[in-house]
Image (tube, rainbow, N blue to C red):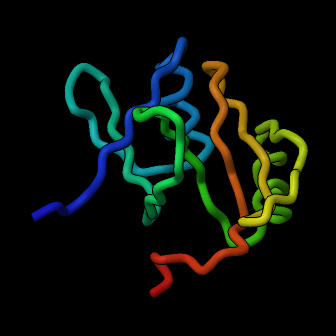
Amino acid sequence: MINGAHVVLYSKDPEADRQFFRDVLKFPSVDAGHGWLIFALPPAEVAFHPAEKNNVHEFYFMCDSLKRTMGALKKKKVKCGPVTEQRWGSLTEITLPGGGRIGLYEPKHPRAIDR
């Protein structure tokens, strides 16, 4: 049966983003060959929202304390966007070296992975 999920992030500078995940976020990885790193991620959840079209996806990291996590990232020279309060959590964005952005939020909703 299904035993995991594989997320693909497209980037204009994938090598810089791989280094960021390896050296800054300290995510463990394996080399799939020729320096192509595949990273382990923290436990994950998936939610389904209504939309006008299919194949639109978003990627967020979650944390227990957005303020503490942003402080730790700032010490590593990681830029975060402004914090906005959403019904479902306190939200910011991390800008990746390749120019992409990943959401980071402290959930206000129950977490499926905590069950």
Which quadrant is home to the C terminus? bottom left
- 63, 73: nearer the viewer: 63
Q: Residue furthest bottom?
A: 115
Q: Is 50 displayed left or right of 34 in the figure?
A: right
x then y, percent, for residue 95: 72, 31
In the rendered view, would you say 9 is above or below 94?
Answer: above
x then y, percent, for residue 90: 80, 61
| Residue 67: quadrant of the picture | bottom right
| Residue in view at x 59 percent, y 54 percent | 61
- 41, 15: nearer the viewer: 41
x then y, percent, for residue 55: 41, 33
| Residue in view at x 53 percent, y 14 percent | 13
Q: Is 13 displayed left or right of 83 in the figure?
A: left
Q: Is 83 displayed left or right of 49 in the figure?
A: right
- 63, 83: nearer the viewer: 83
Which quadrant is home to the N terminus? bottom left
| Residue in view at x 85 percent, y 56 percent | 71
| Residue 37: quadrant of the picture | top left
In the rendered view, would you say 20 is above or below 103?
Answer: above
| Residue in view at x 38 percent, y 33 percent | 8
- 35, 45: nearer the viewer: 45
x then y, percent, for residue 34: 24, 19
| Residue 23: quadrant of the picture | top right
